[in-house]
């Protein structure tokens, strides 16, 4: 039987402006199945615009969620957009990461975190008058805090920020709103996440919730 999968996040996880099949967690699950790892399509708890606090509140409302064979987390862009201090983000992220590990049955090796992409490269950012250098600095600080938290907890941290900067302004890497990624960009994220996910799930035996 397939391993269960819980994906936690915001617009980047729910795939704002792309078809359901184009969301990166679904693309990752398909890639893992193609590798012979029986991972089910994810249950997604994510809404466009959510901050760390709003995701945490949504998890509270959805409890009990049970135990999953694999959990992913990508959160924080809206905290940065709203001007939250990096120390506040670090505290909220650490609490969410602890919950994610709990949903994985206490197994940190079954949790995968993606870095926050750099939306400052997008046409939306230019049109809204945002300073891309400031956005980049703030997101770098957020991602560094998340990476340190993951390292301390033995959780895999995958950098997708670099590809968002290298290719994020390309027309085919953007959804029609000029802000959110296209399915093609999500495919890049899934490609980058695949090695870490494969390593952690190989030999799982396909036991549900394990």
Image (cartoon, rainbow, N blue to C red):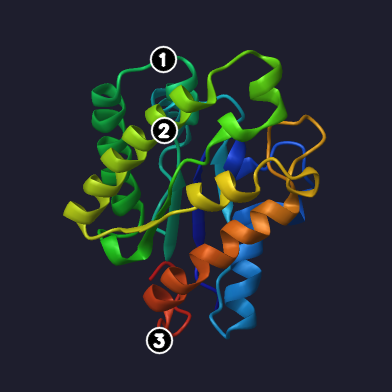
* Quadrant of res 142: top left
Q: CA distance from mark 2 to mark 1?
A: 11 Å
Q: Which mark, residue 38?
A: none
The one nearer the camera, 156 or 95, is 156
Residue occupied by mark 3: 203
Discs 3/1, front: 1
Image coordinates of residue 206 in percent, x first then y, are 48, 80
**Separation of disc 3 and disc 1 at Cα?**
43 Å
Q: Are marks 3 and 1 in contact (CB under 8 Å)?
A: no
Q: Answer with the quarter of the image where residue 55 lies.
A: top left
Question: Callout 3 environment at 10 Å: few (<14), some (14 to 19), or many (20+)?
Answer: few
User: Which is more foreground, mark 3 or mark 2?
Assistant: 2
Please say if 189 is above or below 32. above
Q: Quadrant of the N terminus?
A: bottom right
Return the residue at label 1.
83
Residue 79 appears in the picture as rendered: yes
Q: Earlier in the sequence, mark 3 or mark 1?
A: 1
Measuring from the top left, give residue 71's x and y in whole percent. 43, 56
Task: Say if 142 sits above or below 152 in the image.
Answer: above
SS type, badge 3? loop
Q: Looking at the picture, how far across and down is residue 159, in whole percent?
A: 43, 54
Q: Residue at x 35, y 48 (%)?
A: 100
Q: Earlier in the sequence, mark 2 or mark 1?
A: 1
Of the numbered discs 3 and 2, the one sitting upstream in the chain is 2
Q: What is the secondary structure assignment of the residue under circle 1?
A: loop
Viewer-side residue, 135 vs 11:
135
20 relative to 84 in the view: left or right: right
Q: Residue at x 51, y 60 (%)?
A: 5
- Identify the residue position indicated by label 2 in the image: 139
């Amino acid at each position: 039987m397939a391993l269960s999968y819980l994906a936690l996040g915001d617009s980047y996880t729910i795939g704002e402006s792309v078809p359901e099949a184009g969301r990166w967690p679904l693309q990752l699950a398909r890639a893992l199945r193609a590798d012979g790892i029986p991972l089910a399509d994810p249950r997604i708890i994510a809404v466009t615009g959510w901050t760390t606090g709003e995701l945490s509140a949504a998890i509270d409302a959805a409890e009990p969620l049970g135990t999953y064979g694999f959990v992913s987390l990508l959160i924080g862009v809206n905290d940065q957009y709203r001007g939250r201090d990096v120390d506040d983000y670090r505290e909220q992220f650490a609490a969410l990461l602890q919950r994610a590990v709990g949903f994985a049955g206490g197994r940190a090796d079954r949790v995968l975190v993606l870095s926050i992409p750099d939306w400052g490269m997008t046409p939306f950012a230019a049109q809204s008058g945002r300073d891309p250098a400031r956005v980049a600095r703030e997101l770098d600080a957020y991602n560094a805090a998340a990476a340190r938290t993951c390292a301390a907890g033995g959780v895999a941290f995958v950098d997708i920020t670099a590809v968002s900067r290298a290719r994020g302004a390309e027309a085919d890497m953007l959804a029609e709103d000029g802000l959110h990624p296209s399915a093609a960009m999500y495919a890049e994220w899934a490609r980058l996440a695949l090695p870490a996910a494969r390593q952690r799930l190989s030999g799982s035996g396909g036991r549900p919730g394990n």
